[in-house]
């Protein structure tokens, strides 16, 4: 009975329950949920006989309300799987997410797949009905175990170690990976590569047999709950991932989603005072090094990149991405960066872009995308709307991505109607990015801003074209993109012009889009532009259009 | 009385009407809840009436909605097994097998069996509990404490 007492801080919550604190595990506060009155009655009696404090309810909704109203009122939840008003697994997820309580599932169904489902949804245990006293007598162990884990996790995280992988559903590699990532070691192409490789492996291979992550409303809600629970400032992907407890979700998925989410939040606040805070928080799991690398602020301040537009773009992309939850995040992660969604644009430009990009070597797809993504994330983090899920089929992602770039570039230039050709530059961006990714860690970012091309942008396509050729294809030899694709500029021009992007294209491209370091600058600006042009996108985040003014300067 | 009670209980077990779970429930009984098992069983028979009706209605449909039936039966099984109604539970399992096989006839047949067992058990338990109530107080009064 004194076991609980020995758990130091982890048992503090029990101690807080004055009634039962000295009778652990007696007094354990159990909430039992079962729609069957017979079972419920029996369970209640059994639990009472274990000297637990029992609250019973026969509906999941009631249970949730009870839990929410009394956040610290319960130690463990016991729930049936099959309930009329809500699936037991859903309740399990919600409880785990919102209240982080141990949840045990019960069912007369003992088939493997259901039990597995329970476990993968994060159930601490799965009891087969009819439940016996012995099984109930032991449920306190789950409470202790969980608290111990949490306590350990906190401790470890604070100390920066990552040994405590118990609570993580992620494979061990994830822990290592995330640890480095969490430390903000996004820079260093090596690490990036590792991460990319890992992410690629996860995303591409089916070794882990992980389903593609789709940021559905539900999943996102779980994510949001986790973030809220942690506090937006302390919400690191690793912890979020644990809280969410979704099988198959990787830290990367969460990280990228977090970035977008922060963008979204930023967009919401969209006031300059928040900028710094946001930036820092953007860096989120990683260090402020991101920010440093990005030098986003600087850029924005320097006016080279309209911070507002960037923010809005980010927000937009973030918002949009949520709406397009159908596209798996995994895929999105890789591709979203490039798939700056511009639905409106796409209608026009998409096809064209696609056409343009047909020439793009497929090798750009996974690896490059990953690279680009990584790089984009790293340097631009928020800037890059990573989750701009595209409505277009994946196969077109590359095209889209490139296309978007193109379009963006085009859009940017659309203003002058002369730089549409610039869009072609987008294509090479991939290469550039890859190049950059591998070569430069954070340098790319906005340091290129203000590089030469600003002027060249206005120089018209001619100027761009040569640049395009050089920069784009130098890196990876992906110069398979035919220069002649530039000829499509005109098409893009028109289409892009149609886009409502009111981006200060010049700015974006001045960032050195053509300096051969397209990298993020281009991406950023392109995205920015594109985003802006997207106008109101009915995304979940409620973006209703982007206003450059909103961007903190 | 107690002997009679014990004998009856034994026979219920031997005949397979009840299983171990029943003992579990009886072990839960204490001074505060001396008739706990009876309460539970009463609750069960009251609640399951609705379920039985649902199943019967569902069985009259054509074609049968097997997944729905299976769902009902899952509930029924859970309820019945919670207090150790062994034979009823067996019939539930059988019923579900037929559902999965899409065997409408098998389902209907099994359900008839199930209802029989269900009713039989009810009667037997009624007798048992009556006996238990009579034996209980007597037992306490007689036994020196």
Image (cartoon, coloured by chain):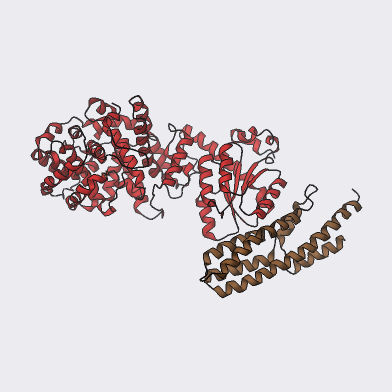
Chain A colour? red
Residue B40 locus on image (x, y percent): 72, 55
Q: Residue at coordinates 69% horizontally, 69% vertically from top-left?
A: B117
Residue B60 locus on image (x, y percent): 57, 70
Chain B colour? brown
Going by the image, does A274 lie left or right of A421? right
Q: Is residue A221 visible?
A: yes
Q: Is residue A189 visible?
A: no
Outermost residue, left side: A462
Residue A274 locus on image (x, y percent): 36, 26
Height in image: A15 above or below A145? Answer: above
Height in image: A312 above or below A199? Answer: above
Going by the image, does A498 lie left or right of A462? right
Residue A298 locus on image (x, y percent): 26, 26
Instruction: Locate the C terminus of chain A and report the quarter of the image it occupies.
Output: top left
Height in image: B124 above or below A182? Answer: below
- Viewer-proximal residue among B110 and A223: B110
- Viewer-proximal residue among A506 and A246: A506
Instruction: Locate the N terminus of chain A and report the quarter of the image it occupies.
Output: top right
Q: Residue at coordinates 28% horizontally, 53% vertically from top-left?
A: A393
């Amino acid at each position: 009975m004194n076991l609980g007492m020995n758990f130091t801080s982890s048992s503090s919550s029990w101690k807080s329950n004055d009634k039962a604190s000295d009778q652990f595990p007696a007094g354990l506060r159990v909430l039992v949920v079962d729609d069957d009155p017979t079972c419920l009655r029996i369970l209640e009696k059994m639990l009472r006989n274990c000297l637990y404090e029992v609250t019973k309810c026969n509906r999941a909704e009631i249970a949730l309300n009870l839990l929410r109203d009394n956040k610290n009122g319960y130690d463990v939840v016991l729930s049936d799987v099959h309930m009329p008003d809500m699936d037991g697994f859903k309740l399990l997820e919600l409880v785990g997410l919102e209240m982080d309580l141990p949840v045990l599932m019960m069912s007369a169904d003992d088939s493997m797949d259901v039990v597995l489902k329970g476990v993968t949804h994060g159930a601490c245990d799965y009891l087969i009905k009819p439940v016996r006293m012995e099984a109930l007598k032991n449920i306190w162990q789950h409470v202790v175990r969980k608290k111990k884990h949490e306590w350990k996790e906190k401790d470890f995280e604070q100390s920066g170690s990552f040994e405590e992988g118990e609570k993580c559903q992620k494979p061990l590699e994830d822990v290592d990976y995330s640890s480095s990532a969490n430390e903000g070691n996004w820079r260093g192409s090596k690490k990036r590569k590792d991460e990319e490789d890992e992410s690629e492996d996860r995303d591409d291979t089916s070794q882990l047999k992980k389903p593609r992550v789709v940021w559905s409303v539900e999943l996102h809600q779980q994510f949001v709950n986790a973030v809220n629970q942690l506090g937006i400032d302390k919400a690191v992907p690793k912890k979020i991932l644990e809280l969410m407890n979704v099988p198959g979700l990787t830290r990367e998925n969460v990280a990228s989603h977090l970035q977008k989410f922060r963008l979204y939040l930023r967009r919401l606040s969209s006031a300059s005072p928040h900028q710094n805070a946001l930036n820092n928080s953007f860096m989120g799991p990683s260090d402020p090094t991101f920010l440093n690398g990005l030098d986003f602020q600087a850029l924005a301040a320097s006016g080279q990149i309209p911070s507002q537009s960037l923010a809005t773009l980010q927000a937009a992309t973030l918002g949009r991405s949520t709406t397009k939850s159908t596209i798996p995040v995994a895929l999105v992660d890789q591709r979203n960066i490039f798939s700056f969604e511009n639905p409106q644009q796409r209608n026009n430009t998409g096809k064209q872009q696609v056409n343009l990009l047909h020439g793009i070597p497929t090798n750009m797809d996974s690896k490059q995308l990953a690279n680009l993504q990584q790089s984009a994330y790293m340097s631009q983090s928020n800037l890059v709307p990573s989750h701009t899920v595209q409505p277009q089929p994946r196969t077109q992602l590359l095209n889209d991505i490139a296309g978007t770039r193109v379009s963006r570039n085009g859009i940017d230039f659309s203003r002058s109607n002369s730089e549409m050709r610039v869009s072609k530059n987008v294509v090479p961006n991939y290469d550039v990015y890859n190049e950059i990714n591998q070569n430069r860690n954070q340098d790319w970012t906005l340091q290129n801003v203000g590089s030469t091309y600003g002027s060249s942008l206005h120089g018209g396509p001619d100027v761009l074209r040569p640049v395009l050729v050089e920069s784009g294809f130098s890196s990876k030899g992906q110069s398979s993109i035919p220069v002649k694709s530039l000829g499509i500029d005109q098409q893009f021009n028109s289409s892009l012009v149609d886009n409502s992007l009111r981006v200060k294209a010049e700015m974006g491209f001045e960032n050195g889009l053509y300096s051969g370091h397209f990298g993020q600058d281009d991406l950023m600006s392109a995205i920015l532009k594109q985003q802006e042009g997207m106008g109101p996108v009915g995304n979940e985040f409620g973006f209703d259009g982007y206003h450059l003014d909103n961007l903190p300067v | 009385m107690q002997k009679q009670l014990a004998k009856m209980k034994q026979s219920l077990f031997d005949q397979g009407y009840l299983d171990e779970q029943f003992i579990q429930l009886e072990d839960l009984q204490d001074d505060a809840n001396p008739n706990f098992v009876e309460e539970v069983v009463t609750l069960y028979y009251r609640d399951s009436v609705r379920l039985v009706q649902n199943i019967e209605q569902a069985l009259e449909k054509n074609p049968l909605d097997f997944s729905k039936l299976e769902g009902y039966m899952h509930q029924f099984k859970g309820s019945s097994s919670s207090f150790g109604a062994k034979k009823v539970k067996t019939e539930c399992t059988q019923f579900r097998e037929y559902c999965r096989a899409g065997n409408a006839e098998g389902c209907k047949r099994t359900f008839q069996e199930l209802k029989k067992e269900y009713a039989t058990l009810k009667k037997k338990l009624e007798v048992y509990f009556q006996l238990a109530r009579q034996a209980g107080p007597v037992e306490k009064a007689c036994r020196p404490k």
